[in-house]
Amino acid sequence: MIVERRVELRFAQESREAETHTNLSAVRQDGRCLWVAGDETATIERLTATLDGDERVTAYEGQATVALADLVPLPAGPGEEADIEGLARANGWLWAVGSHSLKRKKVKAGQSDAKARKRLGTVVREDNRFILVRLPLVTGDDGLPSVVREDGGRTAAVLGLDKDSLTDLLQDDPHLAPFLPIPSKDNGIDIEGVAAHGDRLYIGFRGPVLRGWAVLVEIRPGEHPRDPQRLRALPVGDGGELYRTHFLDLRGLGIRDLCPHGDDLLVLTGPSMDLDGPVRVVRWRNAAKADAAEIVTADELEVVGDLPYGDGDDHAEGIAVLDEGPGTRVLVVYDSPSPERLTADGGVLADVVTLPE
């Protein structure tokens, strides 16, 4: 794939100090705006496009920050990060999903062997990571989208407050249950993408990867009958199952993000472990028409193209289809951006990539 140009994402001082601009993990276009999220906060950011004379985006700026705790209850309160790894938009809703992952503590430079061993043996659960949030989208007087707590009969709501998270649904799953106690970067559970189509959500897992097969879980969330601020999983099939697992042969790679494109799913793929590359975009054609759990072979997936990656940096983490001119263009945002992606005024450069027809 060809990187057509780069676009600067400009953030306010507070977000730069929180390093949100260097920890981007999710992106979704919404008209003139982008919704983005970093994995070190419990917020979502809205950026607005600046256009050139040809109506092409040259930058996104004018950041507006949304604190999730202002709209929904969080299991660990507002002070703990939510590790948002995916954003989706459909039918007047914005969705955000946490990684649902455990983390093993990192060894720090200069530590003694004893302290390093102790940290490697410590696994931490942070409850705010185990959420799926649905937020009502409205259009303001300025013509820009925003999210609110309530809009008529629509209410901001969350799944994951009371032992009802996505991972709780998987407690008896024959493929995924064994990985629930394993930290994310050890090939444990690690959600890194979400796409919405109709009343369904498709949840992409960076890990585990099962003998080369990546995992995608399909769910149908709906409002809880006893509490409008909570969600519950509704049946996705005639058999009453609350989720479906689809397995994609990504040749050993995991899912880094998902983006709908009509009835297709664009899948951003990359290593499941703490490694660099390869990174590519794969198309699952007619994914939204699947009416049963699917085993999708490599021959049934279209490799759209490869993306650049660095040595310890430039990790592609989010993709969004841009509504821009003829052809199909995708915006790619990066976690741990290389120094040349960082601009003098505190922004970060994202790639605009043209997809082959």
Image (tube, rainbow, N blue to C red):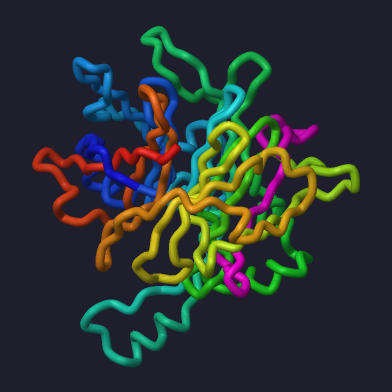
Provide the residue span drawn in magenta. 207-230
Q: Position of residue 351 (x, y in %)?
A: 28, 42
Number of marks: 0
Residue at 27% across / 51% down in the picture?
22
In terms of image quadrants, where is residue 343?
Answer: top left
For residue 11, say whether it is visible. no
Considering only vertical position in the picture, is 191 above or below 283? below
Name of the residue lying farthest toward the bottom: 113
Q: Is residue 16 left or right of residue 40?
A: left
In terms of image quadrants, where is residue 118?
Answer: bottom left
Considering only vertical position in the picture, is 26 above or below 225? below
Q: Position of residue 6 (x, y in %)?
A: 23, 39
For residue 26, say whether it is visible. yes
Name of the residue lying farthest toward the top: 141
- The C terminus: image quadrant: top left
* Magenta stretch: includes residue 223: yes
Q: Is residue 60 left or right of residue 142?
A: left
* Magenta stretch: includes residue 289: no
Residue at 48% across / 33% down in the picture?
70
- The chief SS type of the magenta part is strand
Q: Position of residue 111 (x, y in %)?
A: 26, 84
Name of the residue lying farthest toward the left: 344
Q: Position of residue 292 (x, y in %)?
A: 79, 49
Residue at 57% across / 41% down in the picture?
195
